[in-house]
Amino acid sequence: MDAARNERARKEIAGAESINSLTDMHILYLHQYFATRQAMTGTRSYEFARRLTGKGHRVTMVTSGLANRQFPVPEGKQYAEFEIDGIDVVAIAAAYNDPQVGTGMNGWQRMLKFYQFARLASGVGRKLPRPDVVFATHTPLTIGLAGLALARHFDVPFVFEVRDLWPDALVNVGALKNPAAIWWLQRMAKKIYDGADHIVALSPGMKEGIVRAGATAEEVTVIPNACDLDLFGPDVDGSTHRNRLGLGDEFMALYFGAMGLANGLDYIIEAARILTERGNDGIVLVLHGDGGKRPELESMALKYDLKNVIFSNPVPGKADVAGLVAGSQVCMTIFRACKEQSWSPNKMFDALAAGKPVLINVPGWLGETIENNKCGRCLDPYHPETLADVLEELAADPQLCQQMGTNARALAEREFARDKLADRFEIVLSEAVANA
C-alpha cells in the first residue's frame, strides 16, 4: 500500500461525518458473540448498540445463549428474551457465545456449530417484529447467510460487517488448506457480498479484499475497532493486578486475548527465551487469556525453564481487563506471521486507549499506524529477537516509554474514539434505509 492510499485510508477512518438528525430505525442485529462489558470478549456490538438506543433507535440483538451466563436459554427452549441497557436481546440455543471456545475445535466442528447458529437465528428472526434494516456481523461468515435470508423475508436492506476476511485469513495463517473448503467459503462470501446493500470493513486491507471479491469501493465503508476512552485510560489503577501476578518493580509486557493458531504466541515465548539467554531478568512477559494453543505455549515455557513468563487466567469483565492493562508498561499485539494481514484487533485499540506503547508484529496499516504516530514499534514478524530488542530498549528508557504512551492516548482520542465511530456506523445504517 503506497503513501497516497494510506492517507486516503486514514482519512476515511478518521472522518466520521457529523449528523443533526436521523429517522428512528429498528435494527435487527445478528452477532453470535454479542457480549457486554461483564464478559471476557470483544464488546463492539454492545457499544454500538447501546449508543444507537441512546439516540432513539430500537435494536434487537440476536446472539447465542449457550455458555453465556448473562443470557441463559432455559433447557428445552429455542430462545429467551432479555433487555440490557435498552437493547432487546434474543439469545438462542445454538452454537456458542465465546469465540475462544472455538480455538479448541477443529475446522469442521466449528463450521457445524456456525451453521447451527445461522439456521436457528434465521428461524427465530422470522418470529420477531419487522425491522427497518438487518445488520449481521462476521465472524463467523455463515452469519451473513442468516442476515441475507432475514432481510429478504422482511424485504428490508441488509448491511454486512466483515471483521475478518474468510477464507483469505484462514488460508494465510495455515488454518485452512483444503481446496474444496476454500472454494466453498469463497462462493459463500461472494453470495453474501453480492446480496448486501452495504458492507462495513474493519480495516483498509479488508476493504481491499472485499473489492477484489467483486464489490465496488463505494459499497464498502471502513469502520475499525474503537477505543473505549471511559474504560481504559492512563489514570486507571493497575496495582491490584500487578500484586496478583506477583510483580514488584519488573517491567511488564502484556499480551491479552485469544491463544489460538492465528495468534502465533510462540513468538512471545521465543522472545522470552532470548531475554533469558541474555541474562535480562527484569522484564516479565504476561500472557493473559485462553484458547486452544495455551497448553502448548505453557509446555514451551516449561521446556525452556522460563521464569520471565506468566500465564494469567481470564478475568470476569472489561473493567478488570482495563486494570490489568493499566498495570503493564507496554502491550503486545501479536499474530502468526503470514503473507497478508488485514486485522483490526481489539487489543491494540484497548492499549491505545490505556495510553500504553504498542508492540505489534503486523505490517501494513496497523504497523504503520503505530510507527507513524510514534506510539510503539512495528516488529519483524519472523524474528522474535526484535521483540526482545525493543523490550530491552523501552525498559532502559522510561521517558521514551512514557512519551509513546502519551502519543498512544492522543491517537485514541483523535482517530478511534468509540463515539465518533458509532456516529459513522449510524450513518451507514441510516443511508441503507433511506436508499432502500
Image (cartoon, rainbow, N blue to C red):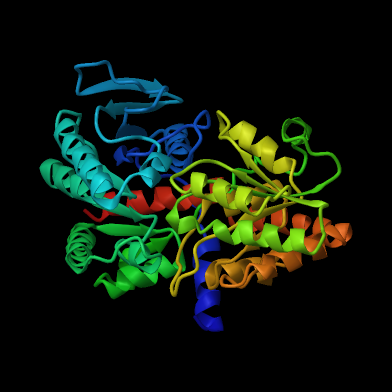
Q: Position of residue 246 (x, y in %)?
A: 77, 35
Across and down, in percent, residue 235 comes to 78, 39
Q: Nearer the viewer, residue 86 or 208?
A: 208
Quarter residue 324 falls in: top right
Q: Is residue 141 above or below residue 44?
A: below
In this rendered view, identify the residue nearer to me: 357 or 133.
357
Residue at left offset 49%, top offset 31%: 39
Any part of residue 226 in sight: no
At x 66% / y 53%, what residue is drawn? 352
Q: How many marks?
A: 0
Asked whether residue 68 is in view, the answer is yes
Q: Position of residue 285 (x, y in %)?
A: 69, 50
Q: Which residue occupies the extreme left position in the image?
A: 153
Give the residue at x 62% y 58%: 268
Indicate whether 117 appears above or below 198. above
425 or 311: which is nearer to us? 311
At a point 25% along the width and 45% down the height, the residue shown is: 109
In the depicted structure, whether residue 37 falls above or below residue 282: above
Give the camera-side residue of 360 and 110.
Answer: 110
- The location of residue 393, given as percent across then percent down, is 81, 65
